[in-house]
Every structure is written in C-alpha cells, then in structure tokens.
Image (cartoon, rainbow, N blue to C red):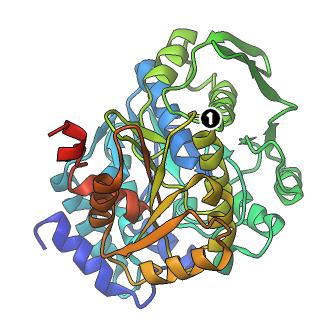
Amino acid sequence: MQTLNDWLAHCERLHPTTIELGLDRVRTVAERMQLRFDCPVITVAGTNGKGSTCAMLEAILLQSGYRTGVYTSPHLVHFEERCRIGGEIAGAADFVAHFASVESARGDISLTYFEFSTLAILSLMAQSGLDVAILEVGLGGRLDAVNIIDTSCAVITSIDLDHMEFLGNDRESIGFEKAGIMRAGKPVVVSDPMPPQSVLDHAKTIGADLWRFGEDFNFSGDKQQWGWAGRGRRYSGLGYPGLRGANQLVNASGVLAALTALREQLPVTAQAVRTGLSMVELPGRFQIVPGQPTLVLDVAHNPHAVAALAANLDAMGFYPTTHAVFGAMADKDLLPMLARIGPLIDRWYFTDMPTPRAATAQHLQTQWQAQNSRKDASATVHADPQQALAAAIVAADPADRIVVFGSFYTVGGVLEGGIPRLTAKHMGT
C-alpha cells in the first residue's frame, strides 16, 4: 500500500461495522506505537459547535505564534482535511508512514475505519513538533478513540439529541458520554448555557476544574462589537467572529474560557484574540458564497443545528424564494428538522448520497410530505447533491436564496465539483 487512498481502502475492509465504541483495542495499539503528546492538548466534544470551536482555537493560537495541530472529522471533500499542521491541511503523502505504523502495531486487533485513521492522524500530529494539539471527538466522548489521549483542557459545546442509538435517548445520557473526556484536576469548559446535570455531576465526581457558561465566564454585546469576561480576564471591543451565526458567540466564549484556563501554558495576547477571531474560516458552517442567487452551505444535520440554521436564515432578511438542497443519514430525527425549517423553504431538492447509511431522496420526500402544511411548497428528488444544486440553480431567480444543508456528504458533494454559480438566466442572456 503506497498511497493514502490505498490505506483508506484497506481501513474500509478491515472491520465489519462502521462504529464500534470502546477504547480497549485502540488503547492497546496506541501503547504498542508508544503514542503520546509532549505538548498541551485541548479536546473538544459536543453535539454541535465542535468544528467551529476547534477552528477558533486554532486561529487564535496561530496568531500567537504557536505551531498548532488540529484533528477534526468527518471531512467535506478530501480525507486530508481531517488534519491541519500549522494551519495547513496535511499532504496525502504525509499520512502514509503513520498508517503503516498502525498496521504493524495492531497485529490481529481489528480496528474500524475511524479508529485506524484516528491512530494514524494522532501519530502524525505527535511527530510534528507541535506546541499545542486540538482534538475533536468523533462520536460521544467517553468511548471515542480520541479519548485515549489525556486532555490538558476539555471543552464541551452544545449538547442535544443525536446518535441516540449509541449515546442514549436523552440529554442526560448523552451528556454523560460527552463528559467522559474530562480529567481529574484539569479544566473543563462547558459552553452549553443549559448543560445536562450529568455533565456538572461528573465534573464534581472526578474533581475536574469546571468552567461553566454564565457563572465562570460570559459575554455581552451589541450590533457593532462584543466583550467577554471570565476568571481573572476580560476582553472588550471585540469584532464579531469570521464565522457567521448567532450561536458562534457562545462557541467563541468557550474558546476564550479554554485559553484563559490554559494561560500559564499557552499565553495569548488580546491582539491575537482579535485577529484570530476575525480571520477564522470553516467551510460548511453557515457559509455564504458570494454571487447570485445567494448560496448558503451548512452541515446542520440534527434538530438543534437545524434550529440554529433556521434562526440564522431568518435573520438574513427577505428573499422571494428559498430553495433547499437536503440530504441526511437514515438514523436522523427527520420530522422535527423538517418541521422547524419548513416554513422558510419554498422548494425542496432532496438528494441521494453515496453511502449505505444515507436516507434515500425518496424517503426524505415522503417524510417531508408527512408533515408539510404548506400548499405552495414543492419538492423533487435527485441522484446526487450536484444534480440537486444544478436543478435549484436553474429554477432560481438571481434574487432568490439556495440553502444546501444536512449531512457532510450533502455539502461536501456540492463542494467537490466546484460550485456552479451562473446559468444563462442569471447572466441575462
């Protein structure tokens, strides 16, 4: 196996299931690899806001002169997006030796695609001379492969209902799983304004240093600027983060709490905070693509994230018609998602996706019809996200809005082919 693609194909063949929670197998292989980090580690768990939180941490720490390593998942288009070193996406060739290391260390231990690739990326990061590592949890926390690494500071973002077949049927159960990334005596920043009691209880039980939104840190602001105050530190006159959406101030507040908690190990300047927050970018998080019609990309794929997307769309102002390209996994709680955003969408373009875990476009349309109360709304089905977007662009007027949302496969499928922007209608020919 000579290339990254060879190794990824190998990983896909290894294990009978996509997800198998538990740390014993991964930990054994990591110990054989002598995998460890010689720098502070920030681990980020939560239902929504993890990627944004990691991106803001990275941006501020880069502005402070630190060599950062970031692991996030899943990717939108290319696997390499999952690892950034010094702010740059790692090259495909950089991964190969580390996949080989995992293979030689695992022996007869079976690893899932996620476990195998996580170990390879952690190995790459551990050998990259980092000043700080930022690790995003893939699923849950307690039993996620990322949790084999002890954190210097845990961050728990918003907690809501998702992946319930693995994590439990209510916020308390899910919160307990997320809380598993905490470590005794280490700071844990909880940026969810209304965290499950299970999160607070676990912090107390193990003796973690709890930083709670609304008690240990908070933010305030107006339309021009915002400010943050936490234990022993205050920032005022901050510009809004480069990432759009009302929920990003909650995420940014958690980021500043984490950096304040780590200020002895990783001091940052106020200027680095200002510049980092203003420059942060993250594709697919309420990303507005310039041009006509207006194009919005968002990987909102659970009820909580879709509610935030709907609020952000509402705040954009009036558009004659809003078109929506939507694809989702079969295990998602579809009805509340469709009901919440339905009043804003005039034309739906449901899409199939290239994974057996996906709901079919026809199933999505059936679910939409089951709860749709708008007689003036319409829906069509399409074979893939690019075809769905192309149909939306043909139908849309320049003053309209197109929203592409749902699974990473939906947004990634649109980004993969480059975004077609103008048809003859929009060019006035």
Which residue is painted at 38% across and 57% down in the image?
A: 411
Residue 1, by quadrant, is: bottom left
Q: Nearer the viewer, residue 55 or 76?
A: 76
Residue at 55% from the left image edge and 62% from the top image edge: 301
Find residue 322 and report its horizontal and vertical position in percent: 49, 50
In the rendering, at what x and y percent does residue 63 appear?
43, 19
Residue type at mark 1 is: Ala
| Left or right of 391, for residue 202 | right
Q: Please state the horizontal and vertical placement of residue 118, each as a whole percent of the image.
A: 41, 63
Where residue 2 sits: x, y (%)? Answer: 10, 68
Q: Residue furthest left?
A: 2
> Tag 1's secondary structure?
loop
Crowding at dot 1, Cα within 10 Å, few <14 / some 14-19 / many 20+, comes out as few
Q: Is residue 92 above or below residue 23?
A: above
Q: Which residue is mark 1?
A: 315
Point 64% across, 80% down: residue: 370
Dividing the picture into quarters, in which one does residue 32 lie?
bottom left
